[in-house]
Image: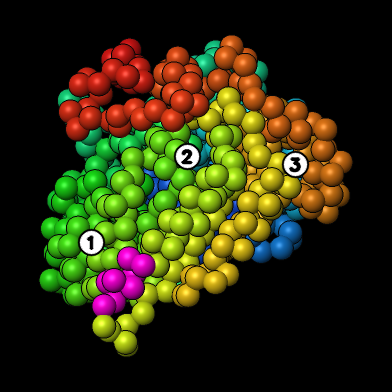
């Protein structure tokens, strides 16, 4: 890349405003005197418009006059990627910052680099560009991408990403080599440089002083568009993390401490963007004490809204009645385990009677579509759990029919969505083996048999192959990058998994020992290994553990976050 001249560096023109929430297209940035930064998402524009973390990073970088950030969407074929803002080639950017949320994103990312003529491993790239990987993968398990990435940003972008980029800008303009720069930042907070950083690297957090339960800078959409998962809606982050401590849920552990946004901060974002619709995003929406007040405020200003899944115990008569008044006709509830025993093992705090009452209430108030989520493939699963589920599904249908009463025009259809359990890093399930593809297909067949004769009940299942692939890429070490390379060279994941079957089985099919080291432990998320092991042993005995208390980490001390936050 041509190095900017001294005259160009002095210009430092302020970039045109491009970060007002909800706008669809920023102005192409002027690179004069700025660090050209490619912000990459391994997917199409629709994925980018639905990814709050990626858009939060864009907002941070675009606000700085020292950085010229441009967006790259990598989901459309495998042609040489160009900027969505200026059509510049990816190779012209000394910084390639990729937000990686899902393991399946590894392949399009690798293919895009190849299409741009950028070597896929860091050892083949001694000079710029610097490939920086952030997003959930960076602190869930960066190991499978460590051969590719020059560095990872571990944690919340608000807590130091801009500082890293400004240091890089200074290095590029001063002619500092990439290797010397990486040595200079290897121990910077939140930076993991494979092979150089002292591990474990501590995840960085943007936490309000004195209030670890407040989400001080909730993420929101920079852009909207009809391609997004919530078309033309301003997405708002209501909460980050989850206090319920379900043992299978990575979000409940890697995003600790759980935090809520203030109603005032969300109202200010809506007033600034003035969108026709708002999509509320969070892992525990009904735990937010201001949820109903905020929804009433949106309704009063004639702003439509949508919500992610709700907890059955939070779906009160008042809340559901208001949702129906606003035209909401689909409700999503999570059942998770097929039996009460499995739900106890998962630490899913769900009262069956409360769940049935929520179903009956939804039918009575005119909800016409209920989605129920279920997870298959638990380590302790057996035929008796599906026998219990069959009876419970019949009770769900009975609750729906009671809610309808004598009505003939209203009918609530039910969709049972069944996914496969992937034992994720940084959860108590990290010691578990994963169910085989044959086991998962057999469980799906049992579900098909039991739902076939239930009136108004449809079944949607995932592909066990994809779940197993996700398991390999989320639990593997640096050797798993070989699988990604195979997929790139052999035409896709299926052939690559066949060629890599023995290694995949070693990663997935065995229960781990208490003291076995994990490749993801190059990161320190704040939750202690001892607490996760305790939860794994309690899961085997189907014992509940309380979730995070409302008083915050200092009032608890169970998982170690209280000491970690003070250190």
Residue 98 or 17: which is nearer the viewer? 98
From where the camera sits, is residue 202 visible? no
Of the image marks 2 and 1, the number of the one nearer the N terminus: 1
Quadrant (top left, top right, bottom left, bottom right) of the C terminus: top left
Magenta span covers which residues?
Answer: 398-405
Left or right of residue 500, residue 101 in this image: left
Residue 175 or 188: which is nearer the viewer? 188
Give the structural element (helix, strand or loop) at label 3.
helix
Residue on which disc 2 sits: 342
Q: Marks 2 and 1, Cα distance to the nearest angstrom?
A: 41 Å
**Magenta span contains residue 151:** no
In front of the other: label 2 or label 1?
2
Give the structural element (helix, strand or loop) at label 2.
helix
Residue 464 or 299: which is nearer the viewer? 464
Relative image position of residue 304 (x, y in whole percent): 26, 72
Q: Marks 3 and 2, Cα distance to the nearest angstrom?
A: 34 Å
Relative image position of residue 47 (x, y in whole percent): 52, 59
From where the camera sits, is residue 335 visible? yes
Residue on which disc 1 sits: 270
The disc at residue 484 is 3
Residue 427, compared with residue 263, is above or below; it is: above
The disc at residue 561 is none
Of the image marks 3 and 1, the number of the one nearer the N terminus: 1
Task: Say if mark 2 contacts mark 1, CB within 8 Å.
Answer: no
Residue at 46% over, 57% down? 391
Of the image marks 3 and 2, the number of the one nearer the N terminus: 2
Is the residue marked by circle 1 packed among few (<14), some (14-19), or many (20+) residues within 10 Å?
A: many
């Amino acid at each position: 890349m041509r190095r900017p001249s001294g005259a160009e560096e002095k210009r430092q023109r302020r970039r045109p405003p491009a970060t007002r929430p909800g706008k669809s297209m920023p102005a192409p940035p002027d690179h004069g005197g700025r660090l050209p930064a490619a912000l990459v998402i391994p997917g199409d524009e629709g994925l980018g418009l639905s990814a709050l973390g990626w858009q939060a990073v864009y907002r941070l970088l675009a606000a700085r006059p020292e950085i010229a950030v441009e967006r790259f969407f990598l989901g459309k074929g495998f042609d040489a990627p160009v900027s969505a803002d200026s059509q510049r080639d990816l190779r012209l950017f000394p910084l390639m910052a990729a937000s990686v949320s899902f393991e399946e994103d590894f392949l399009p990312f690798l293919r895009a680099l190849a299409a741009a003529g950028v070597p896929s491993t860091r050892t083949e790239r001694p000079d710029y560009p610097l490939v920086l990987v952030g997003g959930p993968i960076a602190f869930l398990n960066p190991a499978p991408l460590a051969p590719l990435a020059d560095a990872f940003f571990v944690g919340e972008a608000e807590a130091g990403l801009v500082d890293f980029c400004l240091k890089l800008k200074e290095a590029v303009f001063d002619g500092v080599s990439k290797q010397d720069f990486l040595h200079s930042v290897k121990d910077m907070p939140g930076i993991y440089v494979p092979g150089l950083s002292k591990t474990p690297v501590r995840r960085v957090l943007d936490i309000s002083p004195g209030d670890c339960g407040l989400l001080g800078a909730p993420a929101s959409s920079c852009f909207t568009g009809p391609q997004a998962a919530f078309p033309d809606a301003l997405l708002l982050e209501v909460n980050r993390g989850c206090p319920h401590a379900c043992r299978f849920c990575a979000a409940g552990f890697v995003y600790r401490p759980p935090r809520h946004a203030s109603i005032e901060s969300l109202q200010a974002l809506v007033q600034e963007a003035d969108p026709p619709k708002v999509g509320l995003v969070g892992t525990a929406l009904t735990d937010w004490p201001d949820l109903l007040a905020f929804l009433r405020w949106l309704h009063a200003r004639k702003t439509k809204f949508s919500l992610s899944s709700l907890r059955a115990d939070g779906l009160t008569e008042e809340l559901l009645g208001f949702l129906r008044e606003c035209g909401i006709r689909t409700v999503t509830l999570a059942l998770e385990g097929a039996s009460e025993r499995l739900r106890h093992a998962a630490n899913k705090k769900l009262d069956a009677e409360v769940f049935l009452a929520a179903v009956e209430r939804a039918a009575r108030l005119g909800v016409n579509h209920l989605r129920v989520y279920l997870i298959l493939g638990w380590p302790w699963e057996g035929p008796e759990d599906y026998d219990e589920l069959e009876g419970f599904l019949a009770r769900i249908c009975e609750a729906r029919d009671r809610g309808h009463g004598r009505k003939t025009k209203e009918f609530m259809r039910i969709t049972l969505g069944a996914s496969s359990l992937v034992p994720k890093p940084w959860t108590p399930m990290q010691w578990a083996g994963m169910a085989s593809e044959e086991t998962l297909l057999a469980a799906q067949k049992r579900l098909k048999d039991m739902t076939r004769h239930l009136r108004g009940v449809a079944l949607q299942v995932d592909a066990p192959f994809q779940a197993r692939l996700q398991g390999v890429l989320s639990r593997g070490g640096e050797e798993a990058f070989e699988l990604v390379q195979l997929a790139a060279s052999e035409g896709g994941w299926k052939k690559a998994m066949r060629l890599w079957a023995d290694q995949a089985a070693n990663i997935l099919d065995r229960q781990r020992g208490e003291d076995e080291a994990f490749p993801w432990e190059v990161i320190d998320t704040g939750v202690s290994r001892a607490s996760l092991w305790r939860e794994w042993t309690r899961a085997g005995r189907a014992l509940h553990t309380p979730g995070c208390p409302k008083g915050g980490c200092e009032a608890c001390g169970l998982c170690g976050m209280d000491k970690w936050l003070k250190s």
